[in-house]
Image: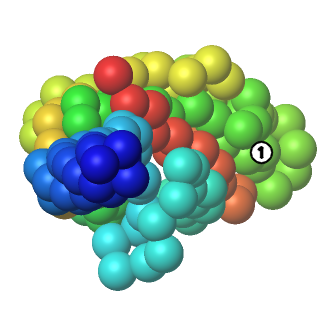
Amino acid sequence: MRVKTILTATLILLIGGTAAAAEASATASVSWTVLPFAVVGIRGGTPGQEVLVSTPLPTPSAEDVTRGYLQVSGAIGLTVRSNTGWTVLVESLSPSLGASDDGTFMWPVDSLQVGVRGSFVDVTTSPQVLASGGRGEHDLTVDYRAHLPAEGLPSGNYQAILLYTVTTQ
C-alpha cells in the first residue's frame, strides 16, 4: 500500500509539473533608439556634415556697379536631409575674397553676404546661421551679394571660399 501511495504521489507531482510548465510564459522586450541626424550636400552631390565651396566671383556688371554690390543669384544649391530640426551655418575660410592683380587692393570677406529666400547674413570667419528647418529633404538655393568698394573694384581673381556646416537642434 505504501508503494501505491508513493507512486500516486509521484504521478500527481509529475502531471502537476507538466501542467504548470504548459501554462508558463516568457516575455522578451526589443527596443531601439533612432538618433537625430542631419546631412548637407551640394545639390546632386554626396552629403556629409559639411561642404566646402569655392565660387569665383564674376566681374561686376554696370547694373552691379550702379546698385553698389555684385549679385550672384543661385551661386550654389544645397540639399539638407534630416530626421530632426537642423541649422545650416556658413563661414569663410579666408579673411578676404582675394587681391587685385597688382596687389594693392584686398577685398575683405566682410563685404560678402549670403542669403536663402531673400534673407541675407554677413559672412565672417566665424560660423553664422544661414537657414533652419525641420525633418525631411530641403533644397536651399544660396545667393551671394558682395558689396563693391566705392572707388571701384580693380581687376583681379576674386572668389568666395565658404564652409557650410549642418547641426541638429
In the rendered image, the quadrant that contains the C terminus is top left
> Picture coordinates of residue 56 (x, y %)?
56, 64
Estimate how packed mark 1 is, as few (under 14), some (14 to 19) or many (20 or more) residues with alpha carbons within 10 Å: some
> Picture coordinates of residue 100 (x, y %)?
76, 48
> Picture coordinates of residue 4 (x, y %)?
29, 54
Q: Nearer the viewer, residue 58 or 93?
A: 93
Q: Residue at x 17, y 34 (%)?
A: 133
> Picture coordinates of residue 136 (x, y %)?
15, 53
Establish if 166 lies above or below 21.
above
Please say whether residue 60 is visible from this viewpoint.
Answer: no
Q: Residue at x 85, y 36 (%)?
A: 104
Q: Nearer the viewer, residue 149 or 1?
A: 1
Q: Residue at x 51, y 40 (%)?
A: 165
Query: Relative to residue 40, is residue 116 drawn left or right?
Result: left
Which element is circle 1 on?
Answer: strand
Q: Residue at x 51, y 44 (%)?
A: 164
Query: Relative to residue 61, is residue 109 drawn left or right?
Result: right
What residue occupies the far right of the structure in this picture? 103
Query: Relative to residue 1, is residue 91 drawn left or right?
Result: right
Q: Quadrant of residue 45?
A: bottom left
Total label count? 1
Query: Relative to residue 15, is residue 68 drawn left or right?
Result: right
The colour mode here is: rainbow
Query: Which residue type carries mark 1?
Result: Ala
In this figure, which residue is indicated by the disc labeled 1? 99
Please say whether residue 23 is visible from this viewpoint.
Answer: yes
What residue occupies the far bottom of the structure in this picture? 44
